[in-house]
């Protein structure tokens, strides 16, 4: 694996090499297909002469472009998303054309390119989020000071008697004789 940060020229070279390899594979696939088509024509002529219906001609197989290595060492995050029929048809078209092997690869590519294309929006959101976090922190500090002024402390939150001591989930709707929290598996001390 190359260094995590590849230069733009290195990416271009890698891309060009990938396209060159794909073209070579495509030429080889077309040659194989022409050979199979020639054989099919001979077979079809002899079957037509006998009055039989020949099988369909063979279809060429387009080799996929070998995937480029990702700068971060691979995709490790899984997400699920609902998309419309038009978007799915576009993704499937990319796969059928041989550009990608799976929907996952195609979607990952399109997401990456979409993020690059709209980096300006993401930069604005990141800037706004920094400001929101700063204001939120100031507000929490202000609320904490107000609570101290009026005599409230942070620990005066009402305790739920029927809550799991570890995960805090409410267990009041469950049978009273349960010995283990169904949410986190913690043993419950029932007296």
Image (cartoon, rainbow, N blue to C red):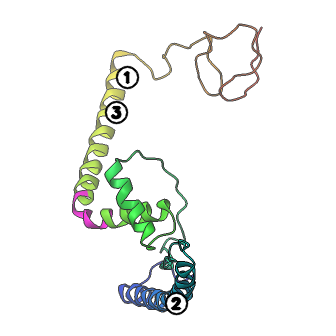
- Kindly report the distance in space between the C-alpha atoms of the residues bearing marks 2 and 1: 89 Å
Q: Which mark is residue 38?
A: 2
Label 1 packing within 10 angstroms: few (<14), some (14-19), many (20+): few
**Magenta part of the chain:** 115-121
> Secondary structure under badge 1?
helix
Q: Which residue is disc 1 drawn over?
A: 148
For label 3, the residue is: 140
Q: Position of residue 133 (x, y in %)?
A: 31, 44
Q: Earlier in the sequence, mark 2 or mark 3?
A: 2
Q: Nearer the viewer, residue 137 or 67?
A: 67
Q: Which of these two is toward me, 26 or 3?
A: 26
- Count neighbours of disc 3 (C-alpha within 10 A) and say few if under 14, some if 14 to 19, many if 20 or more: few
Quarter of the image where the N terminus is located: bottom right
Dividing the picture into quadrants, the one containing residue 144 is top left
Residue 169 x, y percent position in the rendering? 59, 22
Q: Which structural element holds mark 2? A: helix
Q: CA distance from mark 2 to mark 3?
A: 78 Å
Q: Are marks 2 and 3 in contact (CB under 8 Å)?
A: no
Front residue of 38/110: it is: 38
Which numbered disc flags the more N-terminal residue, 3 or 1?
3
Is 119 covered by the magenta stretch? yes
Q: Secondary structure at mark 3?
A: helix
Q: Is residue 33 left or right of residue 163?
A: left
């Amino acid at each position: 694996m190359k260094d995590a940060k590849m230069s733009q020229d290195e990416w271009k070279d890698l891309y060009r090499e990938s396209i060159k390899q794909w073209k070579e594979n495509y030429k080889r696939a077309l040659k194989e297909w022409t050979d199979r088509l020639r054989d099919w024509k001979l077979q079809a002529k002899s079957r037509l002469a006998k009055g039989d219906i020949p099988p369909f001609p063979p279809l060429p197989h387009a080799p996929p472009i070998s995937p480029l290595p990702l700068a971060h060492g691979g995709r490790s995050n899984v997400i699920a998303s609902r998309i419309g029929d038009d978007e799915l048809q576009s993704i499937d078209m990319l796969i059928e054309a041989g550009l990608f092997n799976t929907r996952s690869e195609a979607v990952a590519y399109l997401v990456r390119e979409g993020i690059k294309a709209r980096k300006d929006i993401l930069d604005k959101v990141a800037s706004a989020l920094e400001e929101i976090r700063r204001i939120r922190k100031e507000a929490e500090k202000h609320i904490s000071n107000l609570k101290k002024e009026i005599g409230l402390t942070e620990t005066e939150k009402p305790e739920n008697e029927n809550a799991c001591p570890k995960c805090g989930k409410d267990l009041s709707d469950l049978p009273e004789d349960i010995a283990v929290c169904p949410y986190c598996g913690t043993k419950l001390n029932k007296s």
